């Protein structure tokens, strides 16, 4: 398996021992490029199972947390070791505008414009043009999920919340994605958590975009947000978990597409 890329071999992973359970941080890079790896084929279906189970707990039947972007983006995970296997307990995915363009996919925010005021489309298109024009990566962050079992336990919930905060900072910094975007479901107060980390509402002509009922997301009230600079609080949390990020296991290696878009590696 000479084409397997590990930042650290699995045996050297820094595990987090918490109340008798062991956790590690994983990155699955672009499954589209890495399905030949048995580790990816083993772990990715478990990621999908986690997302479907987690989303069905909070959203109406019919919600689709797994889509084309899961094949071409990166998966950032916290997994628990059980009986010699790694079971995902929390995770999110990230995909860049450049990767979407390469695979002829809409940038994800475009998929949530149904029901939005016209200025939302203008803001999304301006954000994409800004980064493609300046040859900088633009990310989309989505599909965050926590295992419902662990969510019920306040101690594990707080641990995975802090790990989420830390992984967001470390991932987008180390993968050289200066701006990332997302939509926040207001019912879960996602916007409040994001603003704590330095996220802001997307703007048009300097004015924050209003929330709206997203028809393509079961009419949830949502906000479009962007992240250019982590808050001091976010950086402090990230520093607390730096060692675990540095000891993460990276499965696979995404094909380098930077030259196609003139992006400095």
Image (cartoon, rainbow, N blue to C red):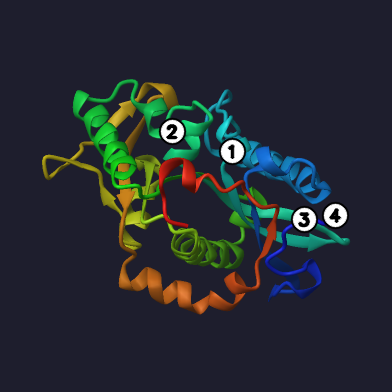
Task: Estimate the spatial distance between the alpha carbons at disc 4 and disc 2, rounded to whole Å.
Answer: 33 Å
Q: Are marks 1 and 2 in contact (CB under 8 Å)?
A: no
Q: Which residue is disc 4 drawn over? A: 1
Other residues around mark 1 within 10 Å, as few (<14) / some (14–19) / many (≥20): many
Query: Which numbered mark, 1 or 2, is in the foreground of this view?
Result: 1
Residue 224 percent location from the top left of the image: 31, 40
Element marked by disc 4: loop
Image check: 37 left or right of 28?
Answer: right
Query: Which numbered mark, 2 or 3, is in the foreground of this view?
Result: 3
Note whether 163 is above or below 42 in the view shown.
Answer: below
The structure residue drawn at horizontal position 52% and vertical position 63%, both measured from the top left corner, is: 167
Query: Which numbered mark, 1 or 4, is in the foreground of this view?
Result: 4
Q: Which residue is disc 2 drawn over? A: 108
Element marked by disc 3: loop
Residue 80 percent location from the top left of the image: 73, 61
Among numbered discs 2 and 3, the one appearing first in the sequence:
3
- The one nearer the camera, 58 or 252, is 252
Other residues around mark 3 within 10 Å, as few (<14) / some (14–19) / many (≥20): some
Q: Could you tell me which quadrant the N terminus lies in?
A: bottom right
Note whether 219 is above or below 265 in the view shown.
Answer: above
Q: Are marks 1 and 4 in contact (CB under 8 Å)?
A: no
Q: Which residue is disc 1 drawn over? A: 72
Task: Estimate the spatial distance between the alpha carbons at disc 1 and disc 2, rounded to whole Å.
Answer: 12 Å
Residue 227 percent location from the top left of the image: 33, 54
- The one nearer the camera, 146 or 152, is 146
Residue 101 percent location from the top left of the image: 46, 32
Query: Which numbered mark, 4 or 2, is in the foreground of this view?
Result: 4
Among numbered discs 4 and 2, the one appearing first in the sequence:
4
Among numbered discs 1 and 3, the one appearing first in the sequence:
3
Image check: 75 left or right of 115?
Answer: right
Among numbered discs 1 and 2, the one appearing first in the sequence:
1
Q: Which residue is disc 3 drawn over? A: 4
């Amino acid at each position: 398996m000479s084409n397997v890329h590990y930042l650290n071999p699995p045996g050297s992973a820094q595990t987090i021992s918490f109340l008798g359970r062991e956790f590690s941080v994983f990155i699955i890079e672009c499954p589209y490029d890495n399905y030949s790896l048995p580790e990816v084929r083993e772990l990715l279906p478990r990621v999908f199972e986690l997302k479907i189970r987690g989303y069905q707990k909070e959203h109406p039947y019919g919600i689709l947390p797994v889509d084309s972007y899961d094949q071409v983006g990166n998966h950032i995970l916290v997994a628990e070791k059980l009986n010699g296997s790694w079971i995902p307990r929390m995770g999110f995915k990230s995909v860049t505008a450049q990767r979407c363009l390469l695979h002829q996919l809409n940038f994800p925010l475009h998929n949530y414009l149904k029901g939005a005021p016209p200025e939302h489309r203008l803001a999304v298109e301006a954000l994409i043009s800004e980064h493609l024009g300046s040859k900088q990566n633009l990310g989309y962050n989505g599909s965050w999920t926590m295992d419902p079992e662990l969510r019920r336990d306040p101690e594990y919930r707080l641990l995975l919340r802090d790990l989420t905060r830390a992984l967001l900072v470390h991932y987008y910094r180390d993968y050289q994605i200066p701006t990332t975007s997302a939509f926040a479901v207001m019912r879960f107060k996602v916007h409040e958590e994001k603003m704590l980390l330095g996220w802001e509402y997307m703007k048009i002509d300097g004015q924050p975009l209003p929330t709206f009922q997203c028809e393509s997301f079961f009419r949830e009230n949502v906000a479009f947000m962007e992240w250019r600079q982590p808050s001091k609080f976010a950086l402090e949390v990230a520093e607390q978990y730096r060692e675990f990020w540095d000891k993460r296991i990276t499965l696979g290696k995404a094909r380098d597409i930077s030259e196609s878009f003139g992006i400095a590696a």
